[in-house]
Structure formats: structure tokens, C-alpha cells
């Protein structure tokens, strides 16, 4: 690793709103804030003030990512929340995949009006995943061991995208499709993802915040059973919305406008109230 490629660039951004309500959008594992840009703009047009922070360890190379755990990712979001909360009347949080799981941890730790979880992933068990994808118990036995944790896995075509135009762009420029994102995932970070999912499931009954779960019926990476598994785990009111014309990346895929509409309506529902805070990380 050279000194240059070890540098982390912060790609966080914010869109100032008009209705006083804040939204934090959280990108996925090995991703970057830019992947939330479409959804952020659509919510901003609805009046929301939108903050898209960068997760700890992201925005650099795989070495930088491997230096962090799911607890580091969660703490970086708590720090972002604490710097943001005084500037808006309330905050809702939403995220894709790992970002969705982390959104729930923020809600368990701080007053959050509502949560949106897109494409929750306890297991990589979608129709396009290789056999290792569903082997979470086995992977957790060895994936974080020295040397093995640095091995990289590549996201298979069609990259969670049913939209052919976006898929073509991803194939043409895999490293430049989203600025700051990585096109490979190290096994050590996959291990952290599994640990995060198990933690969310363990503390789920403590999470009382109203939650919208959005998942595609044809999710190529994460079978819809993941959405219903999360619904069963949570202790508050849950709405599950299944999509019929998207793959895993629902917030940018063919039904992205619908996802933005559903999210805005849910976050703006007059019946929602913030939930009292608890500790973010346990053990």
C-alpha cells in the first residue's frame, strides 16, 4: 500500500431543506455517499434537509476499510447525527443494505422520527449469489482470520441493477461509477456485516422507531426473506413494501422514484414521534 492510496477522501454532502425536517441517508458497505445522491435530491425536492455522511473507513482503499468494524461505522454515524441534530427540527434515517442496518442502530441510540431500510441483508442469499453467499455461519468462522480477511470478492453481474442503462454504466466504469466506492469487498468486511446483522437481530425488540422496509421481490443479492426476518425482529411498528421491477439497489433502480415517494411520505407522516435514546453499541 502506498501513502497515496491510503488517503481517505470525505465524500459526505448535505442538501439544505425548507420544511425543517432532517434526513440522514446511509450508503452501503464498500460504497460511498454518491450512491444516495438520487434519493437525496428527490427528498430535498419534498422539502427535507438531507445529510449523507460517509461511513468510517470508507472513501479510501480496501486497507482503510479493513481497519474498521461495524462499531466504527455506527460511531461515525452517531457523530454525524450529533453535529446535525441542532440544525433541524427532527431527524429520520434511511440506508441501503448495511446502511439500513446501521440506520436502526442510530434509531436505537438517538431520537429518530422514522427509519427506512432498503434491501436489508442478513445473508447474501439472492437468486444471483454464488454458493458462498448463503454460508454466513461458515464464513464467520474463518473470514476475519489474518490473510484470509484480505481476500476480495467481486460483486457479480448485474450488480444489483435491473435498469439496463445503469448496468451498462457500471460495466463501462466499475471504479468510477460512484466516486469513492470500491468495486471489491474484502472478506474481513463481509465478516463485520454479518456481525452487524446479528447484533441488530439481538437488540431488535428495543428498537421502537416506526420503520419502513423496502425490498425487491427479485432482489439478486438478498432474498425477500431478509425483509420479513427484520420485520419479526423489530419491536416497533413496521411497514413492508415489496417492489416488482427492481433488483437489490432499489434506491437507484427502475423504481427509484417510487422509493423516494414512499420514503418521503413515511418520513413526513403526522403520527410519527421521536423515540427516546439508548446506547448505540453493546458489547
Image (cartoon, rainbow, N blue to C red):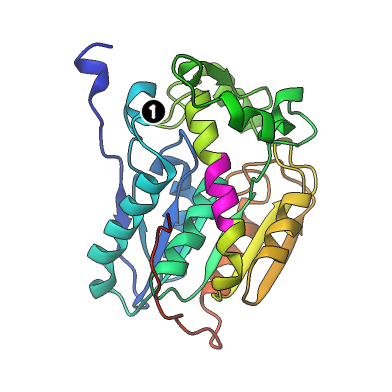
Q: Is the residue 16 above or below the residue 160 in the image?
A: below
Instruction: Confirm whether the magenta stretch covers residue 197.
Output: yes
Q: Residues within 10 Å of mark 1 (few under 14, many from 20)?
A: many
Residue at image point 21% right, 16% down? 4
The quarter of the picture where the N terminus appears is top left
In the picture, residue 218 is in which quadrant?
top right
Q: Name the residue under label 1.
A: 66
Range of magenta residues: 194-200
Residue at image point 23% right, 63% down? 83
Q: Where is residue 64 in the image (x, y as percent from the top left)?
A: 32, 27
The quarter of the picture where the C terminus appears is bottom left
Mark 1: secondary structure: helix
* Direction from residue 216 to residue 173 in the image, left or right: left
Instruction: Confirm whether the magenta stretch covers residue 115.
Output: no
In the picture, residue 25 is in which quadrant?
bottom left
Q: Is the residue 237 above or below the residue 164 in the image?
A: below
* Direction from residue 218 to residue 95 in the image, left or right: left
Q: Which of 69 and 3 is in front in this view?
A: 69
Q: Position of residue 181 (x, y in %)?
A: 42, 30
Q: Where is residue 82 in the image (x, y as percent from the top left)?
A: 26, 65
Q: Which residue lies furthest to the bottom in this view?
A: 271
Q: Is residue 195 visible?
A: yes
Q: Is residue 265 visible?
A: no
* Direction from residue 121 to residue 152 in the image, left or right: left
Q: Nearer the viewer, residue 127 or 229?
A: 229
Residue at image point 71% right, 30% down? 135
Amino acid at each position: 500500500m502506498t501513502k497515496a492510496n491510503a488517503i481517505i477522501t470525505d465524500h459526505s454532502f448535505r442538501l439544505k431543506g425548507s420544511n425543517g425536517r432532517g434526513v440522514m441517508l446511509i450508503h452501503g458497505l464498500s460504497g460511498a455517499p454518491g450512491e444516495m445522491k438520487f434519493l437525496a435530491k428527490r427528498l430535498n425536492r419534498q422539502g427535507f434537509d438531507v445529510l449523507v455522511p460517509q461511513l468510517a473507513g470508507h472513501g479510501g482503499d480496501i486497507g482503510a476499510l479493513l481497519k474498521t468494524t461495524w462499531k466504527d461505522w455506527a460511531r461515525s454515524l452517531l457523530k454525524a447525527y450529533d453535529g446535525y441534530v441542532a440544525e433541524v427540527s427532527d431527524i429520520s434515517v434511511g440506508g441501503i443494505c448495511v446502511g439500513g442496518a446501521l440506520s436502526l442502530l442510530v434509531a436505537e441510540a438517538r431520537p429518530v422520527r422514522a427509519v427506512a431500510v432498503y434491501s436489508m441483508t442478513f445473508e447474501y442469499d439472492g437468486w444471483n449469489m454464488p454458493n458462498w453467499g448463503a454460508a454466513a455461519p461458515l464464513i464467520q468462522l474463518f473470514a476475519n482470520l489474518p490473510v484470509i480477511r484480505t481476500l476480495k470478492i467481486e460483486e457479480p453481474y448485474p450488480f444489483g441493477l435491473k435498469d439496463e442503462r445503469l448496468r451498462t454504466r457500471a460495466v463501462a466504469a466499475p471504479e468510477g461509477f460512484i466516486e469513492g466506492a470500491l468495486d471489491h469487498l474484502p472478506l474481513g468486511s463481509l465478516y463485520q456485516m454479518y456481525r452487524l446483522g446479528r447484533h441488530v437481530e439481538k437488540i431488535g425488540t428495543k428498537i421502537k422507531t416506526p420503520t419502513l422496509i423496502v425490498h425487491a421481490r427479485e432482489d439478486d443479492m438478498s432474498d425477500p426473506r431478509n425483509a420479513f426476518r427484520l420485520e419479526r425482529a423489530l419491536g416497533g411498528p413496521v411497514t413492508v413494501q415489496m417492489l416488482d421491477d427492481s433488483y437489490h439497489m432499489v434506491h437507484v433502480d427502475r423504481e427509484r422514484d417510487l422509493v423516494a415517494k414512499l420514503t418521503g411520505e413515511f418520513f413526513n407522516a403526522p403520527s410519527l414521534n421521536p423515540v427516546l435514546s439508548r446506547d448505540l453499541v453493546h458489547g
